[in-house]
Image: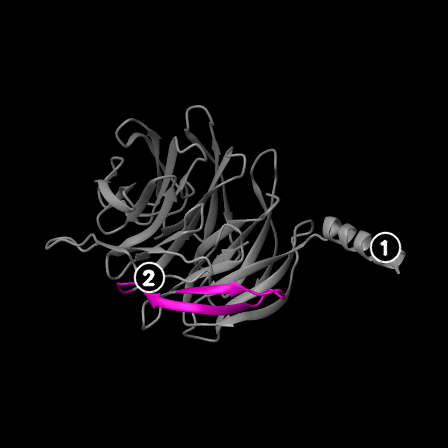
Amino acid sequence: MKFKLLSLLIAMSLYNCTNPNTTLYVGTYTKGDSEGVYKFLFNTETGELSNKQLAVSTDNPSFITFSPDKNYIYAAGEGSTSAASAFEVLEDGSLKLINTVSSNGSGPCHISVNETGNKAVVSNYGGGTVSVYSINNDGALNKASQVFNHNTDSIASHAHSAQFYKDQLYVSDLGKNGIYNYKLENENYTLMDSSIVNMTKNAGPRHFSLTKDGQFIYIINEYANTITSGKKTTNGFELLENISTLADDFKGKSYCADIHLSENEYFLYGSNRGENSIVVFKRNVTSGTLEKIQNISVHGDWPRNFTIGPNGKFLLVANQNSHNISVFKIDKNTGKLNFLHAVELPSPVCLLF
């Protein structure tokens, strides 16, 4: 009996070490054929997506994110109720609703969690507000402890994304054309700056990536189709450069969406909706400057969010209007992409490993 049990434990250990499959969760718009958050098995060695299943039925989960321990998933519900929801990740990978709270503004389009997992922040694009929540030990969201209203009498705010970095909270506001900086002081966040780096007129900052040491920021601009790069100073960030995300010969209309650094921070990727491409930059890790090296078709229409696989070998793109997810192989030496295949899914807009 002991021998059989030992053999079983060894077999399970070997399986866990050799099993290349992991779960990919996909947030969608549910105004068409989609029903909520879906899940796939993703092979981290071959890039194959398989076993599509509905993880949970919910209204317009347009952005989703994990808790640090991956026991919970949080969703910005961009539906009629404008909500933020917490879900428990069950053993089979399906999701169970824990609770739902108001996002305190219309069009919640982004949600993120801090590194300790005890706070979340939601950006409300339509309402121009940013809501900060505390998170209970059971994963539940409390009602917002702070709500920041960026609107003025003359300018409509469009808060598009926010990220925690240590005791800082950075918020990208497309309507106000700036990156806001809040600092945690006595359990509450206080506004430090409404524009941490000089932006070009009507650039439309949408999403951004910070380097792990917090010394560089890369902002993707929806209207200008550029990346704004900044280097940390004692007061905000110093502007390094603005660089186009589009191919030199592209002449049509396009609108940037998402941005991500590679794990080693040698490369930077961005998505172009209109050109329908992923742009690849080689990054100087010392100076922070960028060199554009590739624009590649996403083999779909309107690439919203994209993500890099757990081992850095693949990049996956959610093509909202063509209802498919495209998989690319990443050349680890050059950072360039090579298209592999695509799978169908209604209105995918957010990918999460």
Above-or-below relation of 251 to 93: above
The image position of residue 214, as x and y in percent, is: 40, 34
Amino acid type indicated by mark 2: Pro
Instruction: Residue 332 in the image: state x and y as whole percent.
Output: 61, 37
- Say which element carries label 2: strand
Q: Mark 1: which secondary structure? A: helix
For the point 37% across and 44% down, the residue is 164
For the record, the magenta segment spans 85-106
Tell me which corner region of the image, top left, top right, bottom left or bottom right, holds residue 239: top left
Q: Is residue 104 left or right of residue 153?
A: right
Residue 129 to residue 246: above or below: below
Name the mark on residue 7: 1
Label total for image: 2
In the rendered image, residue 344, in percent from the top left (x then y), is placed at 56, 66
Please state, as top left, top right, bottom left or bottom right, where the C terminus lies in the image: bottom right
Q: Nearer the viewer, residue 280 or 235?
A: 235
Q: Residue furthest top?
A: 286
Crowd band around label 1 with a 10 angstrom C-alpha radius: few (<14), some (14–19), many (20+)? few
Judge whether residue 147 is colored magenta. no
Q: Which residue is mark 2?
A: 108
- Give the residue at x 56% y 40%: 336
N-term mark: 2 or 1: 1
User: What is the quadrant of residue 134 in the picture?
Assistant: bottom left
The answer for how far apart the CA atoms under marks 2 and 1 are is: 50 Å
